[in-house]
Amino acid sequence: MSQTASLILKSSDLTYGSTTSIGTADTNGTVLTWNNINLRVLLGDMYDQYDRFNLNLNTIATSNATSFTGSTDERCNYITIQGLPWVNNTYNQSTNSNTASTVIASILVGSNQPTFQYFYGNNTTTFTKNQDVCNITISFLKIVDNTKPNPSAAYPKIVFIFDIEGVEEYRVKNITESRIVK
């Protein structure tokens, strides 16, 4: 059985419309950035044992925001993540280009009700290590036109729960042979 680290990113740690030492959030809570995530601490022993890691999205859950009543087009989103060195890019057909982010999920955010979505290890993306500390940004984009949502009220508070596993075929045989410059 492989080791697993958990990463929990909560928008409740951020203040919508401002910047704090923890991170930033736009006014509507549709672009969320958590600063100074220490991968070496998060991954523990796995940081030195592997060169590649799978980031598995397990759960997205939102609070019950009674004032959030945006239209379906504003609430039906796909979610991107950036800030880690992805092994593969995300290609966007409508813009005919690769992006620095990768898509991790799609979601219909509940209107006046909490939303829970479980992914059971099916939403996985792979990253390499090239830095000890990173900032992670999660953004919502409307499925209908690839633009940032503009709901009538701020998105409800949301939590993203990830598992991170080392990729066995990229296990470091000898720390001095690692391709990573420290």
Image (tube, rainbow, N blue to C red):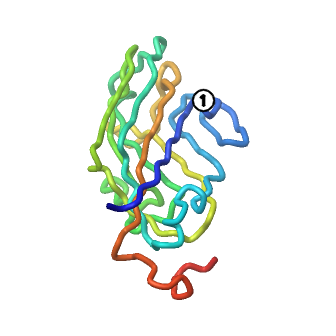
Q: Is residue 180 above or below residue 133?
A: below
Q: Quadrant of residue 23?
A: top right
Residue wearing tag 1: 27
Q: Is residue 57 above or below residue 166?
A: above
Q: Dot 1, how many residues are within 10 Å of its Cα: few (below 14), some (14-19), or many (20+)?
A: some
| Residue plotted at (72% across, 38% down) | 20
Indicate the secondary structure of the residue bearing disc 1: loop
**Residue 142 picture location, percent across and down:** 38, 37
Farthest residue in the top direction?
66
Farthest residue in the right direction?
21
| Residue plotted at (41% across, 59% down) | 3
Q: Nearer the viewer, residue 102 or 11?
A: 11
Farthest residue in the front direction?
1
Taking the image as shown, residue 132 lies to the left or right of residue 20, namely left
**Residue 79 picture location, percent across and down:** 40, 43
Q: Is residue 68 above or below residue 34?
A: above
Farthest residue in the bottom direction?
177
| Residue plotted at (36% across, 62% down) | 2
Query: Which kind of residue does numbered mark 1 sit on?
Result: Thr
**Residue 18 picture location, percent across and down:** 69, 33
- The N terminus, quarter of image: bottom left
